[in-house]
Image (cartoon, rainbow, N blue to C red):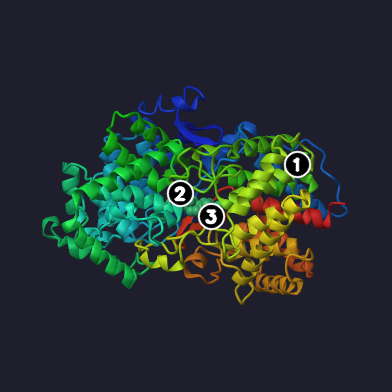
């Protein structure tokens, strides 16, 4: 039995077709009634929370998803009762046993609907947005939730009293001011000791005028910053003719969907009414009297600890123009623009069942809809109902997830990992359930307003999280497709996803290929690279357009290769061409040291795994010049061998992502180790010793129950913000062990 603290037991994860809701003392398992008891919390229970969710960031800022996992394991864990194959020697037996144990443990974490829930926290600028939305709209969270959020925020305060962009990051103005304000909104007294020292941090680093633009935005909405200190968002740009390269329809969808509601708030200069708290906050976070601040001077002020992307000269010129335009703007045009923005917002809300594309527009759209439709409107209520889809409870408190979950993604990977070897077939019930979830999650219909609002056709695709969220991704489609084919080939289930749907998925993947041969995330690249010059966020890089990525490209190439193997007659020459183009892109992306840079996880080991996997699968099949492919593989292997640590493992820190150079972690990491091993094994690297010592790291790190420890943060976006993938610590060691088993043990 794992130790479940009393306070943890009050929280229960309810799931329904991938939807996650953490309920406080739920009366039933009905997701819609999850708030029944949330205000019904005693002072003793609150002090119990403080006790049971105490978390020591200094040993590891990454929580291990224990609240969810311990409950699941205690309720469902059973030793594996099937037959474990006998291996030829003790070493091989150890691998076999570890793999069975790893899969058996992980199978217990699967929810009834077939997916693997997990912590998807990490960024620290998300919860504040939601709390500001809750505050301005007068819709506070229940007390139980508020207490848990406070705990989380305090738990992640750094030693220097500030907070970072994400849980592992050094303190920044953005992180610190946002968490400070959040804690105040949650009712924490300004004389609380941790608050006093946080304030010192803010003051010593120049005060909140130096918060980056996204922070300026939130503070302005909260009426703790003057809108005059904010560069114009030029709402009229939404009325631009579509052919213009700067029309927002061409932006990366996340950027587009964030700047859309921001533009509405800006056009309306939405701000919370002055209250005692607001007036006090104005005094707390600045180094100067609020009334005397020269606001226009602050528009480009950014604390040096926050600066990641320096605004270009073009952007400065553009700001000069748009800021001046504000003085002379024509009111009917402004109205036309806000009307259009509102229509667009409503479409996004409806298409996504009010989940929205992500955590940022989730919060800001709520504010806009409250403003436009009122607190009692159906639309606003629907928004509030979905706030809870983004909250997650772990042993460090209640956080806001970076998405409404990573359901499909984790399930597809888990399925493929287990089916990599025959041992996976010993878990037929688990795989049948994951198949059910994958089947359910494939997108079967479009929305009538998709085309009007620039959405890529989606029928046959898979999303990263849930079908309801309705924003499919190219490589999630590829993973969904590969997992489907893997299950079909296993013969474990009667196929429910028929040939028509498989071909639809292949068609979507084809439709997502860019002119450069690669694949981007949600859409095609819609504008030239120079648009990046207009990136107004000082904290993220490469956010303006949807770029082709090694990982996304490799995933799509692999799934197309599998389509060619399974349905050789289906669009043969078109798919052949697509694969060749994808390979050319991957080859071009390889760095001279043999590695690939990873944009969506930490980091070089991740993308190198994708690159090597795609190339080894395609080699010898007439898609590309084999000599070049062989050279790529050799270089990649040499790179990995060079990075192997003395204990046989691999380890990178998140700084690999932000600094763009391989940054070695002090200790090897199971997730990086697994990626490196997967690459070396797919390359059939000749020096088996290298692989065996790596495998040993995975064996030695495994816990008695079959879990692996939660180590460093694994995910990233936009180079500079990290994100948790709680299930990676199981999925990838299982995958690597499966492959090892297949190559060396399985007959
Ligand atoms: C994700 C999560 C999944 C990820 C992969 C599928 C792994 C990747 O291969 C493609 C990109 C994608 C879909 C992705 C893009 C950026 C996201 C949506 C996220 C990292 C999850 C959260 C992040 C989003 C942008 C966070 C909100 C922050 C903003 C700056 C708007």
Say whether residue 724 is visible. Answer: no
Q: Are marks 3 and 2 in contact (CB under 8 Å)?
A: no
Other-residue count near label 3 (Cα within 10 Å), few / some / many at <14 / 14–19 / ≥20: many
Dot 3: element:
loop
Q: Which residue is label 2 attached to?
A: 454
Indicate whether 13 appears above or below 573: above
Task: Judge: label 2 CB < 8 Å from ligand 1.
Answer: no
- The tag earlier along the polypeptide, 3 or 2, is 2
Q: Earlier in the sequence, mark 2 or mark 1?
A: 2
Q: Nearer the viewer, residue 417 or 482?
A: 482
Q: Which numbered marker is on residue 387?
A: none
Residue 68 appears at what percent x and percent y? Answer: 54, 38
Residue pointed to by mark 3: 521
Residue 612 quadrant: bottom right
State the residue position of label 1.
488
Q: Work out whether mark 3 precedes mark 1 in sequence or the reverse, and give the earlier one.
A: 1
């Amino acid at each position: 039995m794992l130790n479940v603290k009393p306070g943890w037991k009050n929280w229960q994860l309810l799931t329904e077709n991938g939807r996650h809701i953490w309920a406080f003392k739920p009366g039933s398992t009905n997701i819609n009634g999850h708030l029944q008891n949330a205000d019904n919390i005693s002072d003793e229970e609150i002090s119990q929370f403080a006790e049971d969710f105490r978390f020591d960031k200094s040993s590891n800022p990454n929580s291990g998803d224990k609240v969810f996992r311990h409950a699941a394991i205690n309720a469902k864990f059973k030793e594996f009762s099937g037959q474990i194959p006998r291996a030829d020697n003790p070493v091989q037996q150890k691998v076999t046993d570890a793999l069975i144990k790893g899969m058996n443990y992980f199978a217990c974490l699967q929810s009834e609907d077939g997916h693997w829930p997990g912590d998807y926290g990490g960024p620290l600028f998300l919860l504040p947005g939601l709390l500001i939305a809750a505050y301005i709209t007068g819709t506070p969270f229940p007390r139980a939730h508020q207490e848990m959020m406070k705990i989380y925020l305090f738990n992640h305060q750094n030693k220097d009293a500030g907070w970072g962009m994400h849980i592992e990051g050094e303190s920044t103005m953005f992180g610190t001011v946002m968490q400070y304000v959040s804690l105040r909104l949650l009712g924490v007294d300004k004389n609380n000791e941790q608050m006093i020292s946080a304030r010192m941090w803010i003051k010593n680093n120049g005060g909140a005028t130096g918060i980056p633009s996204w922070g300026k935005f939130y503070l302005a909405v909260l009426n703790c910053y003057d809108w005059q200190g904010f560069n114009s968002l030029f709402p009229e740009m939404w009325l631009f003719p579509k052919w213009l390269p700067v029309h927002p329809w061409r932006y990366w969808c996340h950027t587009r969907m964030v700047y859309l509601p921001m533009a509405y708030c800006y056009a309306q200069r939405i701000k919370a009414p002055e209250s005692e708290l607001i007036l006090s906050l104005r005094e707390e976070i600045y180094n100067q009297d609020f009334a005397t601040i020269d606001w226009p001077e602050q528009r480009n002020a950014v604390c040096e600890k926050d600066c990641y992307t320096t605004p270009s000269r073009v952007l400065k010129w553009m700001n000069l123009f748009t800021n001046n335009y504000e003085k002379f703007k024509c009111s009917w045009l402004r109205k036309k623009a806000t009307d259009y923005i509102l229509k667009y917002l409503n479409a996004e809300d409806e298409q996504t069942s009010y989940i929205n594309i992500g955590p940022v527009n989730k919060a800001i759209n709520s504010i806009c809809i409250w403003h436009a439709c009122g607190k009692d409107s159906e639309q606003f209520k629907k928004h509030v109902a979905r706030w809870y889809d983004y909250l997650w409870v772990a042993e460090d408190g209640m956080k806001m997830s970076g998405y409404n979950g990573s359901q499909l993604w984790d399930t597809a990977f888990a399925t493929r990992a287990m089916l990599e070897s025959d041992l996976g077939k010993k878990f037929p019930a688990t795989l049948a359930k994951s198949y059910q979830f994958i089947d359910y999650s494939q997108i079967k219909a479009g929305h009538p307003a998709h085309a009007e609002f620039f959405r890529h056709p989606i029928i046959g695709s898979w999303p990263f999280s849930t079908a309801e969220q309705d924003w499919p991704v190219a490589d999630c489609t590829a993973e969904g497709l590969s997992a489907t084919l893997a299950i079909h080939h296993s013969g474990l289930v009667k196929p429910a996803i028929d040939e028509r749907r498989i071909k639809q998925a292949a068609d979507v993947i084809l439709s997502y290929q860019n002119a450069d041969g690669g694949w981007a995330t949600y859409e095609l690249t819609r504008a030239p690279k120079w648009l990046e010059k207009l990136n107004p966020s000082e904290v993220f890089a490469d956010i303006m357009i949807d770029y082709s990525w090694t990982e996304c490209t490799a995933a799509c190439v692999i799934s197309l290769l599998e389509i060619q193997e399974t349905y050789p007659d289906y669009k043969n020459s078109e798919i052949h061409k697509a694969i060749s183009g994808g390979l050319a892109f991957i080859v071009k992306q390889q760095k001279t040291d043999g590695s690939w840079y990873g944009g969506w996880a930490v980091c070089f080991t991740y993308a190198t795994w994708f690159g090597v996997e795609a190339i080894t699968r395609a080699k010898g099949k007439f898609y590309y010049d084999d000599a070049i492919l062989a050279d790529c593989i050799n270089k990649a292997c040499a790179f990995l061998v060079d990075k192997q640590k003395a204990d046989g493992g691999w380890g990178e820190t998140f700084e690999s992502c932000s600094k763009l150079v391989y940054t070695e972690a002090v200790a090897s990491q199971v997730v990086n180790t697994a990626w490196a091993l997967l690459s070396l094994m797919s390359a059939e690297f000749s020096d088996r010793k290298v692989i065996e010592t790596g495998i040993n790291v995975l064996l030695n790190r495994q816990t008695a129950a079959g879990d692996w420890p939660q180590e460093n943060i694994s995910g990233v976006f936009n180079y500079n913000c990290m994100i948790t993938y709680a299930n990676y610590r199981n999925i990838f060691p299982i995958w690597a062990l499966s492959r090892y088993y297949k190559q060396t043990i399985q007959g």
